[in-house]
Image (tube, rainbow, N blue to C red):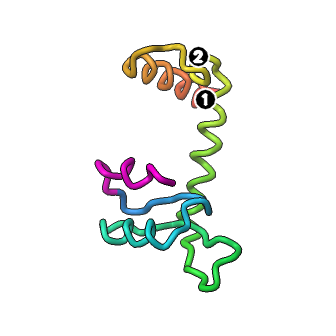
Amino acid sequence: MTQATQLLADHEPDYLIADKGYDSDAFITHIQSRGSTPVIPARAGRTVERRLLRRQYRRRNHVERFVSRIKHYRRVATRYEKTARNFLGFVQLAAILCWTN
């Protein structure tokens, strides 16, 4: 959570989809000030419920399942490659193998 704003510095997404761990008023305000729509479910202890775009939030599940599938390839899961270029190549290869199966 402490590095989330820095990770978003170079990106301007239409929707920012995250889990309940990112539900803080300061982070939500930061997302909205950048012109993005936060799609983050409210924590259980929150007194004021926020509206959740369920159709957008379902997309998070697709990403989570894809990341889980490419981690079955040991070279991607343990990151044997030292350079980002080579690692990206193996991630792309793993994605192609997942897509063809």
- Packing grade of label 2 (10 A; few <14, some 14-19, many >=20) is some
Q: Secondary structure at mark 2?
A: helix
The correct choice, above or below, for 49 with respect to 20 in the image is below
Q: Residue at x 63, y 28 (%)?
A: 71
Asked if marks 1 and 2 touch (Cβ < 8 Å), the reply is: no
Q: Quadrant of the C terminus?
A: top right
Of tags 1 and 2, the one toward the viewer is 2
- Packing grade of label 1 (10 A; few <14, some 14-19, many >=20) is many
Q: Position of residue 75 (x, y in %)?
A: 58, 16
Q: CA distance from mark 1 to mark 2?
A: 10 Å
Residue farthest along the right direction in this orientation: 44
Q: Amino acid at mark 1?
A: Ile
Compare residues 2 and 59 and report the one nearer the observer.
2
The residue to which callout 1 is attached is 70
Q: Amino acid at mark 2?
A: Arg
The residue to which callout 2 is attached is 75
Q: Residue at x 43, y 24 (%)?
A: 88
Asked if residue 35 lies left or right of residue 56, the reply is: left
Q: Residue at x 39, y 55 (%)?
A: 5
Region in magenta? 1-12
Compare residues 80 and 37 and report the one nearer the observer.
80
Q: Position of residue 80 (x, y in %)?
A: 54, 14
Q: What is the count of numbered marks? A: 2
